[in-house]
Image (cartoon, rainbow, N blue to C red):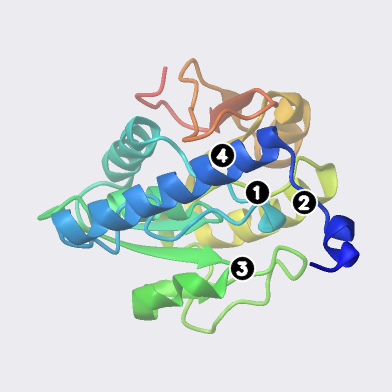
Amino acid sequence: MDDDDDDIPQLSSHTLAALQEFYSEQQQREGTKTSQGFNQYSIGSIEEDWQLSQFWYSDETALCLAKEAVLAAGKGGRIACISAPSVYQKLKEQDGEDFSVCVLEYDRRFSVYGEEFIFYDYNHPLDLPENLLPHSFDIVIADPPYLSEECLQKTAETIKYLTKGKILLCTGAVMEEQAAKLLGVKMCKFIPKHSRNLANEFRCYVNYASGLD
């Protein structure tokens, strides 16, 4: 054998174990999809992309937020999910509910949802399709991808343009003051959870009497 083999970088046992765990989880997920029949609306059917600051809600949180949105929108209501695809997915699982919903998202993988997907870049908050009329949604749910005042400020422009009045915002606890200033929302008692633990404390904010308190 050539001595050059000694120059090939070796993975540490810790890194190898982490890789094996990752591939094992991936195989398990694929097996679950195959055995249960793939549901394109289930949370996790589209993997999180951390480079896009994507962190999906836990199943319980997504269901709680979806039910809150349906109640707030009312019969025949219209719901917009801005950068909150896991709530959109849970809403689509609510068979027989009388409402319509769309998802505004930067990640084009969500275009699998057809006409209900609207490409959205928070850097261009009002660059929206003509059919998204101002103040045409009974409630807007938003989860800005970044914990920055700039991101919240720009997303707030979109929220205020689309909503008839009701807003459900999910973002970090550190954004409480800016959220109140920009959108007139107050922190709820309900604490949202994610499928993976995040370092930052997350909270929900609303500007109406909600079931999240």
- Residue at image coords 53%, 34%: 196
Residue occupied by mark 3:
106
Q: In the image, residue 201 lies at what x, y percent? A: 65, 22
State the SS at label 3. Answer: loop
Q: CA gap, disc 4 to disc 2?
A: 13 Å
Query: Which disc is residue 151 wearing?
Result: 2
Amino acid carrying label 3: it is: Tyr
Query: With respect to residue 97, does 196 lie above or below?
Result: above
Horizontally, residue 75 falls left or right of residue 141, namely: left
Query: With respect to residue 33, does 123 lie above or below?
Result: below
Q: Nearer the viewer, mark 4 or mark 3?
A: 3
Q: CA gap, disc 3 to disc 1?
A: 11 Å
- In the foreground, 158 or 198: 198
Amino acid carrying label 4: it is: Leu
> Number of callouts in the render?
4
Query: Residue placed farthest to the bottom in the image?
Result: 130
Q: Nearer the viewer, mark 1 or mark 4?
A: 1
The answer to whether residue 77 of the structure is visible from this angle is no
- Residue at image coords 40%, 65%: 102
Residue 169, quarter of picture: top right
Residue occupied by mark 4:
169
First in sequence, mark 4 or 2: give its number: 2
Is there CB contact under 8 Å for labels 1 and 2? yes
For disc 1, the neighbor class at 10 Å (few under 14, some 14 to 19, many from 20) is: many
Q: CA gap, disc 1 to disc 4?
A: 8 Å
State the SS at label 2. Answer: helix
Q: CA gap, disc 1 to disc 2?
A: 7 Å
Q: In the image, residue 155 lies at what x, y percent? A: 68, 55
- In the foreground, 10 or 100: 10
Is there CB contact under 8 Å for labels 1 and 4? no
State the SS at label 1. Answer: loop
Is there CB contact under 8 Å for labels 4 and 3? no
